[in-house]
Amino acid sequence: MTLTAPPPTLPSPAPEALIPEARRRGRRRLARRVALTLAVVLVAAAALLTTLTSGTPGGSGARGSGAVAASAPQVATCTGRAVVEPSSLTLSCADANSALTATRWSAWGARSARGVTTFALNPCTPDCAASPLRHFPGATVVLDRPVATPHGARFSRAVVTYRSGATAHRVIQLLTTGGRA
């Protein structure tokens, strides 16, 4: 008769050693869920706000400087709606971390649009999900680089210059150009 030894077993960690790691994994999962939920809510709120403030049903926004040339480019909102001289506009559609509010347009032409705005920016400190938007009144905005689309010309870039304390900052944001007329 042949006796065989039982297979070797690996020592398993003590159950109390696993508890802190399980708690860390649970906290990370919860933080990811909260961040994702908050991002979805922010995008939905920004889309709703943009829709409510984008102006008349014909697609033009609040007019600030008077008559706009028929050939002047429009700007697309995050919902795809084309507007002219919007008083509010979300610049970063994916996360709603930057926006223009209370915008007064001084010029809206074939090559660019210029105005003064309150620039809202998420500094993402300590992270983007937990950080509130900071508002910088008196910022300047230039929309430029019009591109041809099936629905007409659309501005494709926003350049915002704002001050934080004594320091001037410039943010360049590519804009969505798709959507409906």
Image (cartoon, helix red, strand yellow):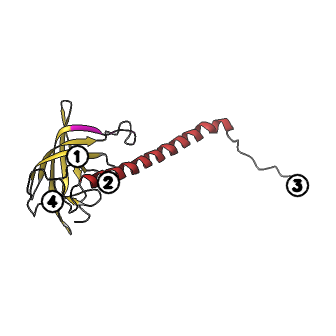
How much space separates mark 1 and mark 2, taking CA atoms? 13 Å
Task: Give the foreground label among 1 and 4.
Answer: 1
Choose mark 1 or mark 3, whichever is in front: 1
Q: Residue 170: x percent and y percent?
A: 19, 42
Q: CA distance from mark 3 to mark 2?
A: 76 Å
Q: Is residue 65 left or right of residue 132?
A: left
Of helix, strand and loop, which one carries label 1? strand
Q: Which mark is residue 61?
A: none
In percent of width and height, residue 15 lies at 68, 38
On the image, numbered disc 3 is attached to which residue? 2
Q: Which of the two discs, 4 and 2, labels the residue nearer the N terminus? A: 2
Relative to 2, say whether 70 is above or below: below
Q: Disc 4 to disc 2, how far (Cα)?
A: 23 Å
Residue 135 highlighted magenta (yes or no):
yes
Numbered range of the magenta stretch: 129-136
Q: Tell me the element at label 4.
A: strand
Q: Is residue 69 magenta?
A: no
